[in-house]
Amino acid sequence: MYCSGCGQPIAPNQPTCAQCGRPAYQPAPAGFPQAAYPPTGAAYANFAPYNRVHRHIQTLAILWLAYSLLAVAAFLVVIPIISHMFGHGHGFATPDNFPFPMSLTWLLPVITIFVYLRAILGALVGIALLRRERWGRVLALVVGVLTLLKFPIGTALGIYTLWVLVPSQSAQEYDQITTI
């Protein structure tokens, strides 16, 4: 075994590197039994190290779930305002003083469908990343790019998603954690 910090050989029973003092192996990620981590012998060949994607994937998944919940909650708060603006509430949207040349009563259901679809996609990304599904990375990338347009929170989440999952090594790292 070799040190991940300086590359010096480490004896199998040595807890830290004698050269740089770094632990001989990373602590077990959440959900892994401590006694079986890290694997030794033949099981070490299939061992997926605790990598950059592994460190960020749970945070990313939770953020996607929270973002989806926030989108639906914000829309539920804004529905009365939109309803009045587009003629559903008949508050100020009468034919005499309606600010648009035609009735836009069809717009509220379209916006509602769009918001719910976006929330469902975000929740699906969060669940797929939490469950380490193979297709979760691709879905997260697609939804992350689409979410870049939703400034400021969606833009930040989209950039974070792309930062974690786009680099060339991220595909290999994500594949490693899906097989665990």
Image (spheres, grey):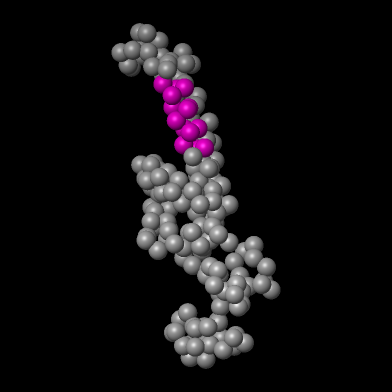
Kindly identify the residue that appears in the image at 47 percent across and 16 percent down: 88
Q: Is residue 109 found inside the magenta-colored segment of the image?
A: yes
Using the image, determine if residue 91 lies above or below residue 9. Answer: above
Q: Residue furthest bottom?
A: 18
The quadrant of the rendering that contains the C terminus is bottom right
Q: Residue furthest top?
A: 96
Using the image, determine if residue 85 lies above or below residue 131. Answer: above
Q: Position of residue 86 (x, y in %)?
A: 41, 19
The image shows a total of numbered marks equal to: 0
Magenta part, dominant SS: helix
Q: Position of residue 90 (x, y in %)?
A: 46, 13
Q: Residue furthest left?
A: 101
Using the image, determine if residue 100 lies above or below residue 21. Answer: above
Q: Is residue 140 found inside the magenta-colored segment of the image?
A: no
Kindly identify the residue that appears in the image at 59 percent across and 75 percent down: 42
Q: Residue furthest front?
A: 42
Residue 64 visible here? no
Q: Position of residue 162 (x, y in %)?
A: 39, 54
Res 13 → quadrant: bottom right
Q: Position of residue 68 (x, y in %)?
A: 51, 41
Chain part drawn in magenta = 107-120
Kindly identify the residue that appears in the image at 56 percent across and 89 percent down: 11
Residue 10 visible here? yes
Kindly identify the residue that appears in the image at 53 percent across and 31 percent down: 76
Q: Nearer the viewer, residue 36 or 117?
A: 36
Q: Nearer the viewer, residue 98 or 15?
A: 15
Using the image, determine if residue 50 lies above or below residue 128. Answer: below
Q: Nearer the viewer, residue 42 or 149?
A: 42
